[in-house]
Amino acid sequence: MCLCIHINRGKERCLQNQHFSERIIKGRCAAMGPFKSSVFILVLHLLEGALSNSLIQLNKNGYEGIVIAIDPNVPEDDTLIQQIKDMVTQASPYLFEATEKRFYFKNVAILIPEKWKTKPEYVRPKLETYKNADVLVAEPNPPGNDDPYTEQIGNCGEKGERIYLTPDFIAGKKLRQYGPQERVFVHEWAHLRWGVFNEYNNDQKFYLSNGKREAVRCSATITGKNVVNVCQGGSCVTRRCKTDKVTGLYEKGCEFIPADKQMEKASIMFSQNIDSVVTFCTEKNHNKEAPNQQNQRCNLRSIWEVIRDSEDFKTATPMTTQPPKPTFSLLQIAQRIVCLVLDKSGSMTLGDRLKRLNQAGKLFLLQTVEQGSWVGMVTFDSVAHVQSELIQINSGTERNALTNRLPTAAAGGTSICTGLRSAFTVIRKKYPTDGAEIVLLTDGEDNTISACFNEVKQSGAIIHTVALGPSAAKELEELSKMTGGLQTYASDQAQNNGLIDAFGALSSGNGAVSQRSIQLESKGLTLQNRQWMNGTVIVDSTVGNDTLFLITWTVQPPQILLWDPSGKLQNGFLVDTHTKMAYLQIPGTAKVGVWNYSLQTSSQTLTLTVTSRASSATLPPVTVTSKMNKDTGKFPSPMVVYAKIHQGSLPILKASVTALIESVNGNTVTLELLDNGAGADATKDDGVYSRYFTAYDTNGRYSVKVRALGGVRTPQKAMPPQNGARYIPGWIENGEVKWNPPRPEVNKDGLQGKKVCFSRTASGGSFVASNVPKAPIPDLFPPCQITDLKAKIQGESLINLTWTAPGDDYDHGRAYKYIIGISTNILDLRDKFNESVQVNTTDLIPKEASAQEVFVFKPESITFENGTDLFIAVQAVDKVNLTSEISNIARVSLFIPPPTPPETPSPSLPCPDINVNSTIPGIHILKIMWKWLGELQLSVALG
């Protein structure tokens, strides 16, 4: 269910059924008004929602192809460019020494916003775009939150998505809070490139080890003070931390402040600001007991062990000379240039492919491609035909002119290279091919495609590939891989709307998000005689401009009924009987709320597509971006599908998210994606929804589409992002603790728990599966690893465990049983799990995947006494006896508070007989008082 809340008043509500095809919703959902700007200032990032496709390559120890993008909302400032150069230049030798002379930064491209002044040294980008930027420099959101961080959606050892930095951080204005910029950049680079995690823990800063309190740090030999800053009435006092008599840990607010003079060199992933820290923790000095993300996510392995297992490390040997300084190229975004290269060979006559190409092409030309873009068109069979030279789109006139040039007849063979070469010629008549985009659609086989690979590489153009049908050229995706383009696949199943989805996904990689086409709905249905296709589309307050309803059919036009949220019937659909489509452009901004539609027809297939744009240039729209973890899957290795749902920088939580994965056989698997921090999902409540895919049914291409409905818009938390450099609470100077100001708090009034009613669909591209056996496909998928095991003491001797249930096949189905092992030695439990003490789990029946498990037990065969540290891990087993990896290792430390002596009431003592008006000298009065206090103290002691 999706609950619409009127954001401005919070009173009017409408319950909206997620399954739209059964009936027309008769109720009306009050229009969602604009969010109150006074509640929260939302900064519009151009890269909002992006999931990256990095161009970074390691070439002889040097990293090339690094892209650092300056967000268009950053005010023009030439010094920022120099500061970026300085940061990377100084970070390079730090990285070089930290990796034992293996890696350095070789060349970096800096993407400069289009609205900044043009300079002779600024050149047009080639493959570099905002979508594939590795680092984004953007204004803080919310203001004052300059945390540097890295977006990581994968597991240990998997590359991150992007580093986020702010202009003030790069300018050196946050040195006291994070340390030198170049050191922080290396910290974030380790997140991004090698998939390692932090060695501090903001949620639990101390832990017990053998009854002793320890700060979460790496290495454990870093020294410092455990102090708390107590403030009252405008004045603050630093004192030693007190011990909590219940937990044995330090009181809330206690901080570990590293000493100003250290000998320890590790670790950069704990606190890179310490002067002596110049390396990562290794297996020799790694603190395996510290409850931090690195230990939890990487199975107690040190940072250096994870780096050593990376492909980078395997291909690089230590250098014997000092590396050169990095070089920089300054690239300025320019107008978008697109050339459509469309297959019109004889096979395009099969299954209405040419009609479907026209439908998808019209959507792209009428709606998807942005105003101001330059668009050309080439068709090809065995030869190429220029349908249109580059035309700049300034109005509907140019859009209509281009749609009239779409191919209407198909014949001949297939020569992809001929089409590409013709497109290069069309583009070069007006512009260089650097950074230009080519949308290549083909359904035919072509064994000569590799003949133009070198030309494609040298062109600097980005090629997006659309494979139509089961026989499209096998090497087609190589073109998108080598150029950083999007790869998509559409089957011949018209009801899946795959071709329209593929073209709808081709919005600019550099355009402002407010100008991008956003798909609100994409669905299809094969109807029998006189049946109805009924449903609703939600237009939320973040979209509504340039809204288009597009309907296609396979036989004859259906009856079309569309009502806006006020119940007004919409007329004016433009019907194209030749292309078999009808569309309606809503003038101005579409009304916010629930739009109802009903389509009635004879026996045929109908599809409905609804697209829109942001309602405002200053209010970020809710966006959904989707991707697979890789573009090829080899059975039985699982794939992972991701969907990122955000509004600006705010994650959307508790949304209903499903992925539709269609194989080349036409079979579609529906997966519910989750943001629960278990299974394939790396981090709970980060707005990234994930799930494993294991339902292979054949070799070949698979398409991916994601649907999202409703959710909760959350405020930016005051806590730092999980994968970023440590905020320094304070430092020691001449033996005195100096404190940084606390983090800026966020005004959460009116934000937290706000339900936002929206609908979105998004293409997740495609992937290619191989090594899939013929049916029946054997069960080779074990349960997934449990990654969120938690343990706590219950009572005096019981241990309470909680975790998210894995499945029979990774995170699907139900596991057969659990094995729980315990040990007082953390490494023994990890390395010799089968030899550990096993807990009796006879009564523990696994639940369905993603359910919450709770298990309470009393340790047997182990002496569990005061000061004992007990380590626990869980392994899941499926019905064919395949086992998961052992879980993250949880720990409990038994702390029995010392007995509190009973209080005995003290006898009443007479007050000293002192006359306040006495003329006795003051010193005499003090002596009497001291004597009286001494008697009272002695009385209490004896009592």
Image (cartoon, rainbow, N blue to C red):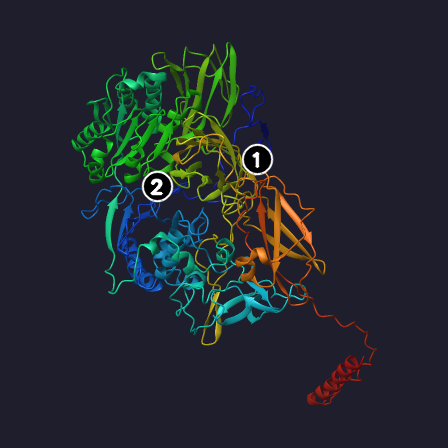
Q: Secondary structure at mark 2?
A: loop
In the displayed structure image, the side of residue 614 where residue 795 appears, left or right: right
Q: Do we see residue 438 in this rendering?
A: yes
Q: Position of residue 685 (x, y in %)?
A: 52, 45
Instruction: Name the residue located 43 percent from the left edge and 37 percent from the top edge.
Output: 626
Distance from Cα at disc 2 to Cα at disc 1: 37 Å
Earlier sequence position, callout 2 versus callout 1: 1
Q: Any mark on residue 131, and which? A: 2
Looking at the picture, tell me which residue is in the foreground, 881 or 693. 881
Query: Around disc 1, counting alpha carbons within 10 Å, would you say few (fewer than 14), some (14 to 19), or many (20 or more)?
Result: few
Residue 881 versus residue 23 in the image, above or below: below
Q: Quadrant of the N terminus?
A: top right
Which amino acid type corresponds to the residue marked 2 in the rendered image?
Lys
Residue 51 lies, in percent from the top left, at: 40, 42
In the rendering, which numbered label is found on residue 9? 1
The 10 Å Cα crowd at callout 2, few under 14, some 14 to 19, many 20 or more, is: many
- In the picture, measured across the screen, residue 121 lies left or right of residue 634, that is left
| Quarter of the figure with the C terminus | bottom right
Query: Which residue is rendered at x = 72% and y = 61% of the image?
Result: 796
Q: How many marks?
A: 2
- Left or right, residue 222 beside residue 796: left
Three-letter amino acid code at disc 1? Arg
- Circle 1 — which element? loop
